[in-house]
Image (spheres, helix red, strand yellow):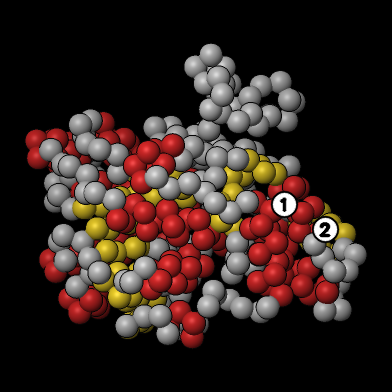
Amino acid sequence: MRALITGIGGFVGGHLSALLRQEGFEVWGIDRLPVAAGVANRAVAIELGDVCDPAFTDRIVQAARPTHVFHFAWEFDPSRIGSTDAANRNVLGLTVLLESIGASARHARVMIASSSAVYGATEQRPTDKEAQPKQTTAYRISDGALDRQPIDEDAPLKPINAYGISKVAMETAAASFRGPHGMNIVVTRTFNLLGPGMPSRLFAGSLAAQIVAAERGGPRTIKVGRLDSSRDYIDVRDAARAYLALAMASKPTIDERDAAQVDVALASQPAVDVCDAAPAHLALALASQPTQEPWVFNVCAGAAHSCRELADEMVALASVPVTLDHDASRLQSGDIDYQRGSSARLQRTTGWTPAIAFSTSVRDTLDHARRKESLPE
């Protein structure tokens, strides 16, 4: 089996490449920047370039002849919130990649990484205790009055920032290739990642980097933003196992009549910017394919932890006393109060379950930062 990973040098790509190599895959990679030696040593070849370039992408797909493709390459500029430029480039990159796969590796299983950001501030309704008597673990709203249902894949898509909008647009493009073109595509909506190699630009990675700096003689005040929001954290190693499980699952069936209906319906829509059109087009595509097996999957642990809880656990692991200090510059626009997902569909389809405890992920995130490693060996 041959796997092609776009964005192989990133946080997720590094872990997945290690897992695929362990499982006997021949690994190929694409990245825009040079990758760590540990990642490079696992791959048959890693090509540096832009997936938006058809000639470059065609050449790599033809050379790799992948049986499985994992698409993580992503462009996002947080300094340009609301800009559609990145969204349009990301959709272009995916489109070029899928066209190349369709031409040279049509039977490849393609896994496209989306995000829970597509759900935005989806209202999580009070749990019906009679309908879900024991299966749902209770996580309380701030006032402690109501339990919340986890978000499943049928929840409405309400992205509230450019990143979420980009991911919805990408899913729309994937739907168009999966239906009319009959390609073997699955999409993963991953919730918040945690674990060794966490980038310092993200909350947990920033905490770890600041604690390590304090342990090495730096300031003992840890700058943080909002701590009262809660997220569903999944360890990156568990996520990598989920991606592999989905890649190895049987191909979903496609009804050609449904695919044709999607093609006609999408073609009949007025020409608008991809970011404005994406949620409506994706909903239309999904609604037009009712008989298909699931192809969109949440990847999550199914438990919500507050940023305060994460910070307190990591601070408790510090080898020197440190304190948390609120920094208004770290607040993010469009932040979400609470997210907890359901991976029931993924578990039914593949048998996958999360195996790494939240506390273990927190500890390993900090320990990895202490070792100054950027990616797993």
Question: How far apart in space, not on screen, are marks 1 and 2 (Cα)?
Answer: 10 Å
Which of the image's four quarters has the N terminus? bottom left
Is 287 displayed left or right of 43 in the figure?
left
Q: Which residue is mark 2?
A: 316
Q: Which residue is mark 1?
A: 310
Q: Report the amino acid beneath label 2.
A: Ala
Residue 26 location, quadrant: bottom left
Q: Is residue 217 visible?
A: yes
* In the rendered image, the vertical position of residue 183 relative to residue 46, given as above or below: above
Nearer to us: label 1 or label 2: 2
Q: Residue at x 72, y 52 (%)?
A: 310
Disc on the earlier residue, 1 or 2: 1
Q: Judging from the image, what secondary structure is the residue with disc 2 in?
A: helix
* In the rendered image, the vertical position of residue 170 relative to residue 44, given as above or below: above
Q: Residues within 10 Å of mark 1 (few under 14, many from 20)?
A: many
Q: Residue at x 43, y 48 (%)?
A: 352
Instruction: Tell me where residue 136 appears, x and y as whole percent.
Output: 56, 28
Instruction: Tell me where residue 334 appears, x and y as whole percent.
Output: 59, 45
